[in-house]
Image (cartoon, rainbow, N blue to C red):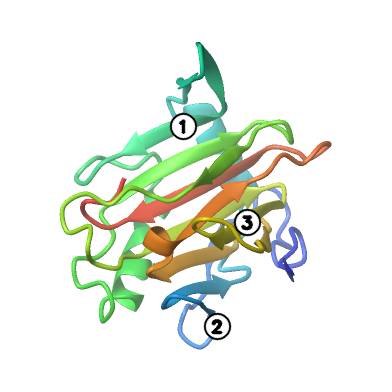
Amino acid sequence: MSIGIQDSLFDTPATGAAPTVHPLDGAITRRHLPADAWVDLRPGWLTGTADLFDHLQRSVPWRAERVRMYESTVPVPRLMAGYPAGARLPDPLLATLRADLTAHYRPTLPEGFVSAGLCLYRDGNDSVAWHGDRIGRGAYRDTLVAIVSLGAPRVLALRPRGGGAALRFTLGSGDLLVMGGSCQRTWDHAVPKAPGAGPRMSVQFRPPGVL
């Protein structure tokens, strides 16, 4: 299945326009998944994203990671940066987004969102394999992970842990996707390769103890 959230339809302001954060209340669509998991979608939550993308691409201290695979160590096909609780975020707008998410989801997530992770997919050859975000202390509890997409549209896919049919959500620039309920325990997510795609960035906001 593909959810048609497309770049540029919602992000209409020209380069140089100030970014605008739109309301969450009344604009989120929730999709309930098996095993008490769910996904919230808010297309076009942030508009006027071009300058924000450029600023983050230039100013964030991106790092390349390597992972052990079989008998060799291979590069992870994306760049990453992390901002733990209490760290200064690379743009004040990210703090605004985190505060708005915390306020909106406070009844479900009293501890709020505290950390931010950024991933840069330099082109369609960059990707991330199936995984679930690791939960530290309190792993028995359900939690939330919020993702804001910037730049070129890319698919975020979800499938039940252990295998099964995948759902595909196409996220454009400024779109919000929130994984909640048991999603991190019972589902995996991935960003598959997309030949010919342009640069894309994701900003993930997480509560305490979620990595």
Q: Which amino acid does label 2 sit on?
A: Ala
Q: Name the residue under label 3.
A: 157
Which numbered dot is residue 80?
1
Q: Which amino acid does label 1 sit on?
A: Met
- Residue 86, compared with residue 163, is above or below; it is above
Dot 3 alpha-carbon crowd within 10 angstroms: few under 14, some 14 to 19, many 20 or more: some
Residue at 51%, 74% (x, y): give it. Answer: 40
Residue that protrudes farthest toward the right in the picture: 196
Q: Distance between the residues labelled 3 and 2?
A: 22 Å
| Residue type at numbered disc 3 | Ala
Q: In this view, does 117 lie to the left or right of 31?
A: left
Query: Which residue was labeled with disc 2?
Result: 27
Labels 2, 1: front one: 1
Q: Considering only order in the chain, which callout, 2 or 3, is on the residue closer to the N terminus?
A: 2
- Which quarter of the image is occupied by the N terminus? bottom right
The Cα–Cα distance between marks 3 and 1, rounded to whole angstroms, is: 19 Å
Q: Which of 158 and 174 is in front in this view?
A: 158
Q: Can residue 145 be seen in this view?
A: no
| Other residues around mark 2 within 10 Å, as few (<14) / some (14–19) / many (≥20) | some
Residue furthest toward the top?
72
